[in-house]
Image (spheres, grey):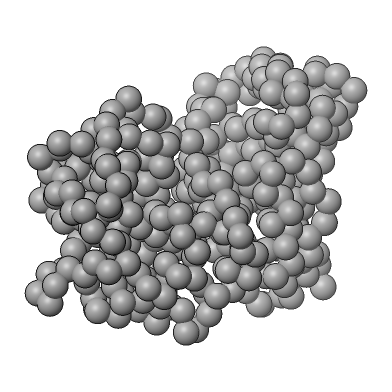
Amino acid sequence: MPSKGALVVCQSGYEGFLAREIAGLGLSAGESGPGWALARWDAAEGEADPGLRLRDAAFPHAILDAPAPVSGSGVNEIAQRIMEQFAEAVRGERIEERWPCVFAGSQDMTGLGRRVSSVEAAFHQLLKKRLGRVARLATGDRPRLGPARGLFVWFTDFGTAQVARSAHMNGQCRMADDDSAPSRSYLKIEESYAIAGAEPAPGESVCDLGAAPGGWSYSAAKRGARVVAVDNGPLKGGALGNPLVDHRHDDAFGFSPGREAVFDWLFSDMLEDPHKVVQSIVRPWLEGGWCRRFVVNLKFGRVDPIALLADLRSATSPFSVHGAGVRIVHLYHDREELTVTGSVKR
């Protein structure tokens, strides 16, 4: 039975949780380092590839398929070896469209970013000389979501890189800040829209539970949505006094939209026990059909995130019973928290 593998990239500092999630998927978690872990598995012919499970996992940001290690003592040597491997891989292949050429590595290793940039620059010089037309079609832009084919290079240390021709991106991405945003949490909801595959539209309704200081409410209102922001705390920045934001001074756990109301979106980002949020907010809102879509942020600072993931994915979870297209992810802008997106079954 042939063995397959992948380099799985996550937010730096969370590779321990990533390795545990990999193992929980029935795969083998091998070597790891700041922001990455290797996964291996056996693939029986004719059966679904077990590695596909990584695409639905929470902690992976990117999955580099069947990576090959490249080592060298200096910038030019590493670049040359990557060039040799890439040239061999594209032999006989006709490249007619723009293709991603992405070089990256852990941000926690001092000076590694400069090494990555230097090798990338040296590689592109070699690529221009050897495959000029292919070089002109290369882009350093990292794909946001889904499968991609090109060249993906991840440095695990100064002398070693893992090189892959194909990768799968799970949607996490650094977002641009907004001076009018009341808080850093604004970045999380902005990042969530690509994961959800939708965002609030003009005229849609949003209920933001635990809204203060209003980062998520502001994000929806700037898109033209009408927001009911529920929180006893004050709103700030672009949410304060916004004509599209109706601030209700109320307890988020006791708030319900009323018998006739259905919101297009439910937002929830609260500093509360995640199980309490799921049982006291998610369950009644999804059971009652009080919303059509949802983005819920759950804090795992005081609970085991892998056990929490198991609970959220269980057959009795309200996300499983009442949700459709549910995704649970650890966002680029998440810290000790998971973000859940999806829609309500009709």
Q: Locate residue 61 relative to residue 121 in the image: left or right.
A: left
Which one is nearer the viewer's eye here, 216 or 117?
Answer: 216
| Observer able to see residue 125 | yes
Residue 285 pos. (x, y %): 29, 72
Tell me: residue 295, above or below residue 235: below
Residue 45 x, y percent position in the rendering = 71, 75
Residue visible at 21% across and 53% down in the picture = 249
Which residue occupies 32% across, 25% down? 179
Percent coordinates x, y for residue 113 in the rendering: 69, 23
Residue 41 located left or right of residue 344:
right
Q: In which quarter of the image is residue 263?
A: bottom left
User: In this rendering, would 86 be left or right of 252?
Assistant: right
Work out whether 230 lies above or below 137: below
Vertical arrangement, residue 325 with respect to residue 17, above or below:
below
Q: Where is residue 155 in the image (x, y as percent from the top left)?
A: 75, 34
Residue at left 39%, top 82%?
321
Residue at 72% from the left image edge and 63% from the top image edge: 20
